[in-house]
Amino acid sequence: MNAKTIILTAAALFAGFAVWAQDPQKASQDSLGKVERLKEATVSARRERIKTDADKLTYNVEADPLADGSNLIDILRNVPMLSINSDEEVLLNGSKDYKVLVNGRSTGMLARNFNQLIKTIPASSIKEIQVITNPPVKYDAEGIGGIINIVMAKRLKSGYSGSLGANAGTLGNVGGSGYLSAQLGKLTFSTNASGSYFPNPTVHGITEIENFVSENNHYQRLDFSSDNNYSTGAFSLEAGYEPDSLNLITLSGWVNIQKMLSHYDITETFWNTDHVKTVEMLEPTVRTNRYNTFSGELAYQKTFRNDGGILTFSYSIDGNPNSTDNNIIVKPVLNYPDYHRHSFNTEHTIQQISQIDYFATLRKKHQIEAGGKYTLRSHVADSQDELWDYDAWSWVIDNSNVNDLDYKQHIFAAYASYGYKFSKVTLKAGTRMEYTLNRGLSKSASGDITFDNSNFNIVPYFNAAWQIDPKSSLALSYTRRLGRPSVNYLNPFIFEESPYSRMHGNPDLRTVVSDALTLTYRTVGDQWDLMARTYGSLCNNKIEYLSVVGPDGIKVSTYENAVVYDHIDCMVSVGWNPSGKFNLQVSGDVGYNSYYAPTLDQRNGGWNWYFSASGNASLWRGATAFASGGAYGGDITLQRTYYGVDYEYSFGLRQGFLQNRLILNVSAIMPFQRRYAGTVRETRTETYHQHNESFYDPRSLRLGLTWRFGKTSINLKHARKTEVDDKL
C-alpha cells in the first residue's frame, strides 16, 4: 500500500474519530497538568491573535488554534504584511529583502535557508511572529525591507511537557518532530528535534530569448522540467539557570543539516535571423546542494533592584559549511559537440558576535537603551571545475572558470535611544552607528586579487505614538536601513548553469542605504480590530541582478549597485471574532515600485498588490475547520516584469482527542487546481528580450498527528517576570 492510499484511508476514517470525540464523557477541558485554583476568582480574557505597536506587528501563534499539527509555513500565510509566492518564498511587503531573527538575535538556524526550513518546523514550537518594518536602533540595521523575528515558545513551568508529531502528504513528503521542556528547580531546558523529506511537484516550462546582438543565435528556446527534493534534519537545545530573581544565565545551540537534490531535463534550440535552426541539444543536469548550519549562544542577564534596569552580555557563533555539486551533460542533436562539465564548490562561513545591551524604565516615563556590538564574519570558498575529455576518456581540470574567495567582514556598532511618555503621547528617538570593514582575496587562474572597502553609516530612528482613546492609536516612525551584500553576492566564482548561461558575484558591491517612513493606525472593538498602515522607502544604490547576452549567445549575470529604488504601499488588515467559535482575518496591500538605473538609462515601474484571508470555525467538541487563501501580482525588478496572478488556497480540519492531547490535522492544498500556471516573466535589456512561463500540479493532501504529554503544576503565586518591550 503506497503513501497516498494510506493518507486517503486515514482521512476517510477521520469522520468516525470525530463522532467518537463528541462524547462528553471522553472529552474535557484542555489541560496538560494540575492547576492550583484560587477560590472565588474568575478570570476571563480574550487572547488577541494580532497586536500592533508603534513599530511592529505581532502575530500570537499560541492563540492560533491551528498551531498544533501545522508547520511554520502554514501559520506565516495568515500573518499580515507577509505572503508566500508560487515558489514558496516568504515575502515581506512583496519583497525578499529582509532579515530573519530568532528571539531578537541573528542565528544561522533560520536566517539562512529560511524558505526551506519553515516547511519542517512545528508551529507549536513558536510563541509569536513579529513583523518589524521600522526597527528601533537596538536591532541591526541590516535588512532593507524590515525584520521577521521568530520568537520561540518557552514553557517555564515546573515539571515537564512535550510533544511528538508525524506528518505525511500525497506528494511523498514525510516528517517527524519531537519537543521536550522541563524545569528542575532553578534549571530550565527545552529541546527540539525534527526531520523531513519534501519533494516539490515537477515543474514544466519554457524560456524564449531573442538576442539582439547575434545573427546566428538570434532566437533561443528552452523546454524544461525540474524536480527538487529536500531532506533535512534539525536539533536544538536551550537551557537557562536562574540562581535568583536578579540573575539569569542562558545557553542555546542549534544544528541543521539539509540537502537539496535537483534534476533538470532541458531541450535547448537556436535559430538564426531567418528562422533556420542552427543548434539543438539535450541537457540532463543533476545538482546537489548541501546547506548545513550550526549555532550557539551564551548570555548572562543582570537585573538591578533600584531602577529595574536589565544588563545583558552575550556571545554567539554561527557556522555554515555548504557545498554545491553540479553536473552538466550535453547530448548533441545538431551542430554542438559532446560536452560534460562537473563543478564542485565548497563554502565555509563563520560568524561570531559579542554584544552588550542595557535597558531601563525610570519613573514609568523615561526609557533608555544603549549597547555595543562586534561582528566578525569569515568566509572561505574553494572550487574545482573539470571537463570530460572524450578522446582520452578522463577528466581534465579547467581553471578558466575557477574563482575562489577568502573574505572577512568586521562590523563595529554602537547605539543609544531615549523615550519619554506623556499622558497620551510617547516619543522615542535614537541613533545607531556602524562601521564595516571588508577584506577579500579572490583567487583565479589569472592571478590573485586583493580588495578592501569600508563603510561608515549613521542610522537615525524616531517614533511618535498617540493613544487617541483606550481603543485607538496612531503612530509615526522613521528609520534608516542597511543592506550589506552577502558572500554569495560578492563571490566572483563563475557558476555555469548551462553552456549558454553563467552567473558570478561582484566583490566591489557597496552597502545599500534606504530611508523608510511608516504611519500606522489601529482601532479595536469588542468583536473586531482594524489596522491601516502606509509605508514608504527611498534608496539610491539598490543592488540588482543584471544580465547581458553576447554575440555568442551566452548570457552572463551578476549583481550591481545600479538602481535608484522608490517604494510606497498602503495595507489594511481587519479581524472579526464575533464569538469564541469563529474567527476571520482579512488583509490587503497595494503599492508602487519605481526602478531607475542612471548608468544603463533604464527604467521600470508598476503597481504590486496582495490579498489574503483566513478563517476558522469550531464545529463540535475538539474540532475546528479552517480555510485560507491569498493572491498577489505586479512583481517587478529593473529588467523583469511579472504578468498574471499568483494565488493559493487550502482547506482543513483539526480534531482533538483524549483531552486534546492527541491532535489530528488534515488539510487539502489547492484541491481543485489540476494545472497551476505561475506568473509570466518578461525580461527586457539592451541586448536581449526573454519570456518565461511554467506550470505544475499543486494538489496535495496532508495528514498530521501530534501527541502532547506532560506533568506540570502552575504556581499562581510566582511573580510575573517583566518583559522588555519596544514601547513604554
Image (cartoon, rainbow, N blue to C red):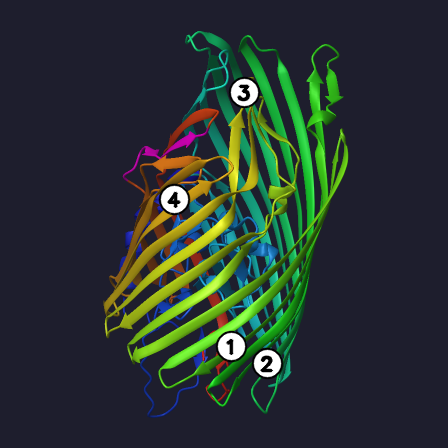
Which badge, 1 or 3, comes first in the chain's sequence? 3
Q: Nearer the viewer, mark 1 or mark 3?
A: 1
**Which corner quadrant of the image does residue 397 belong to?**
top right
Using the numbered discs, state the Cα–Cα distance from disc 2 to disc 3 in whole angstroms: 60 Å
Q: Residue at x 48, y 18 (%)?
A: 267
Q: Depth check: 21 or 575 in front? A: 575
**Quadrant (top left, top right, bottom left, bottom right) of the C terminus:** bottom left
The image position of residue 293, as x and y in percent, is 63, 51
Indicate which disc residue 192 carries.
none
Q: Residue at x 43, y 52 (%)?
A: 73
Using the numbered discs, state the Cα–Cα distance from disc 1 to disc 2 in whole angstroms: 9 Å
Q: Amino acid at mark 1?
A: Val
Q: Amino acid at mark 4?
A: Ile
Q: Amino acid at mark 2?
A: Ile
Rendered view: 300 above or below 282: below
Which badge, 2 or 3, comes first in the chain's sequence? 3
The image position of residue 634, as x and y in percent, is 34, 42
Q: Nearer the viewer, mark 2 or mark 3?
A: 2
Residue range highlighted in magenta: 672-685
Residue receiving disc 2: 310
Query: From the viewer's perspective, is 523 left or right of 502?
Result: left
Using the numbered discs, state the Cα–Cα distance from disc 1 to disc 4 in whole angstroms: 45 Å
Q: Are marks 1 and 2 in contact (CB under 8 Å)?
A: yes
Using the numbered discs, state the Cα–Cα distance from disc 3 to disc 4 in whole angstroms: 36 Å
Rendered view: 307 above or below 488: below
Residue 276, can we see it?
Answer: yes
**Quadrant (top left, top right, bottom left, bottom right) of the N terminus:** top left
Q: Nearer the viewer, mark 3 or mark 4?
A: 3
Residue receiving disc 1: 724
